[in-house]
Image: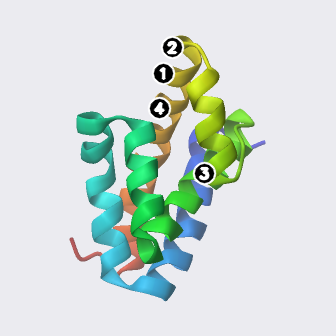
C-alpha cells in the first residue's frame, strides 16, 4: 500500500499533467504561488478568490478540492466546501489547511517537473 506521501505525489502528478495540458506554465506559476497566498490570507479566502477568478484558477481550486475530498472527506464542490469550513471547529479547519499545504508542496514540484523542469 502506498504511503500518504506517495498518494499525495501521485495525485499531484496527475493533476499537474491536467493543469499544464490545459493552461501551460501559467498553471505551474499559480501552483507555486498558492501556498504563500494561503499563508497570507487563509484557505477560505484563497478558495473564494480562485473560484471568482475562474479559468485556470478554478482548475487549480478544483484539483485541491479533489485532493481534500479524497483525503479528508471534505465536500468536493466549492459551495459545499465553503459551507462546511464555515461550520467546523478551529482544529478541523487547521487540519484541512495543513493537508492543503502538504499536497501543494507536491503539486509545486510535480508541476515544475511536468513543465520540463523550468521554474
Q: Quadrant of the C terminus?
A: bottom left
Q: Any mark on residue 90, and which?
A: 2
Give neighbour class at mark 3: few <14, some 14-19, many 20+ (Cα, 10 Å): many
Per the image, the residue denoted by label 1 is 94
Q: In this view, does 53 lie to the left or right of 59?
A: left
Q: Is mark 3 on a helix, strand or loop?
A: helix
Q: Any mark on residue 46, and which?
A: none
Q: Are marks 3 and 2 in contact (CB under 8 Å)?
A: no
Give neighbour class at mark 1: few <14, some 14-19, many 20+ (Cα, 10 Å): few
Pointer 3 or 4: first along the chain: 3
Q: Do the residues labelled 4 and 1 touch (CB within 8 Å)?
A: yes
The structure residue drawn at horizontal position 66% and vertical position 32%, both measured from the top left corner, is: 84
Residue 12 x, y percent position in the rendering: 54, 59
Per the image, the residue denoted by label 3 is 65
Furthest residue to the right?
1
The structure residue drawn at horizontal position 64% and vertical position 49%, both measured from the top left corner, is: 79
Per the image, the residue denoted by label 4 is 97
| Disc 3 to disc 1, C-alpha distance | 15 Å
Pointer 2 or 4: first along the chain: 2
Pointer 3 or 2: first along the chain: 3
Placement of 69 over or under 25, stated as above or below: above
Residue 111 x, y percent position in the rendering: 40, 69
Between 103 and 113, the one nearer to me in the picture: 103
The structure residue drawn at horizontal position 44% and vertical position 50%, both measured from the top left corner, is: 48
Whether residue 7 can be seen here: no
| Disc 2 to disc 1, C-alpha distance | 6 Å
- The quarter of the picture where residue 80 lies is top right
Q: What element carries label 4?
A: helix
Amino acid at each position: 500500500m502506498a504511503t500518504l506521501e506517495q498518494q499525495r505525489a501521485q495525485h499531484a502528478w496527475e493533476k499537474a499533467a491536467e493543469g499544464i495540458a490545459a493552461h501551460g506554465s501559467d498553471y505551474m506559476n499559480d501552483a507555486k504561488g498558492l501556498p504563500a497566498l494561503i499563508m497570507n490570507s487563509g484557505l477560505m479566502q484563497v478558495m473564494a478568490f480562485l473560484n471568482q477568478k475562474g479559468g485556470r484558477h478554478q482548475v487549480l481550486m478544483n484539483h485541491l478540492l479533489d485532493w481534500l475530498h479524497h483525503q479528508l472527506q471534505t465536500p468536493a464542490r466549492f459551495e459545499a466546501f465553503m459551507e462546511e469550513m464555515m461550520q467546523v471547529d478551529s482544529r478541523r479547519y487547521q487540519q484541512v489547511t495543513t493537508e492543503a499545504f502538504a499536497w501543494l508542496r507536491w503539486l509545486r514540484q510535480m508541476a515544475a517537473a511536468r513543465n520540463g523542469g523550468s521554474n
